[in-house]
Image (cartoon, rainbow, N blue to C red):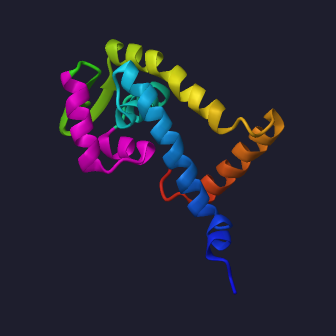
Amino acid sequence: MIDRAEELEAFAPYLMNRIMARYNKGVEAGLKEAGVSVAQMRALVVLTESGPCTINELSVLTVIKQSTLSRTLDTMEAAGLVVREARDGDSRVRLIRLTDAGHSAYLAAWPTMLGMRDTMLSALDPDEQAVLTQMLLRIFYDIRHHDF
């Protein structure tokens, strides 16, 4: 008879989902102290690393549905963390840009992200961590549907 628990533990997508759920739960508590949500932090990180982008681009890069992201951006804009601006005078396309306050929030919250990453990967030595990252990147670039 097949042990379903063992079969499930050998199913990589299930494991990745469980790992990320635990990671996000730990990050959520730490980010609360910094005054940002997980969704807000995702937006802060992407805008810091990628610069201004459209909501569609930000939705893909943050892995947040556009409707949820739009509400998150409303809250962030009200808090002065981001601004929405027309792109090159075209009012149909809005770019989301990080403000100085948004960059400060990123700097305050980023150590929490690094700390949780270190906790999550603590069972692996640095060489194993590098191999894992390279393997995940190979999977990511093979499976993605967008250019970003």
x%, y% of residue 116?
A: 57, 31
x%, y% of residue 98?
A: 34, 22
Q: Residue at x 62, y 76 (%)?
A: 4
Q: Is residue 92 above or below residue 146?
A: above
- Please state, as top left, top right, bottom left or bottom right, where the N terminus lies in the image: bottom right
Query: Could you tell whether 134 is left or right of 113 in the image?
Result: right
Query: Could you tell whether 58 is left or right of 91 in the image?
Result: right
Residue most extreme to the bottom: 1
Q: Quadrant of residue 15?
A: bottom right
Dominant SS type (magenta) = helix
Can residue 27 be seen here? The reply is yes
Q: Residue at x 68, y 70 (%)?
A: 6
x%, y% of residue 143?
A: 57, 61
Front residue (pair 4, 61):
4
Q: Residue at x 58, y 62 (%)?
A: 13
Q: Is residue 21 above or below residue 45?
A: below
Q: Is residue 128 above or below residue 4?
A: above
Query: Could you tell whether 111 is left or right of 142 in the image?
Result: left
x%, y% of residue 26?
A: 49, 35
Q: Quadrant of residue 87?
A: top left
Front residue (pair 57, 4):
4
Q: Residue at x 73, y 46 (%)?
A: 132
Range drawn in magenta: 54-78
- State yes or no: residue 65 in magenta: yes
Front residue (pair 121, 139):
121
Front residue (pair 80, 12):
12
Can residue 84 be seen here? The reply is no
- State yes or no: residue 52 in magenta: no
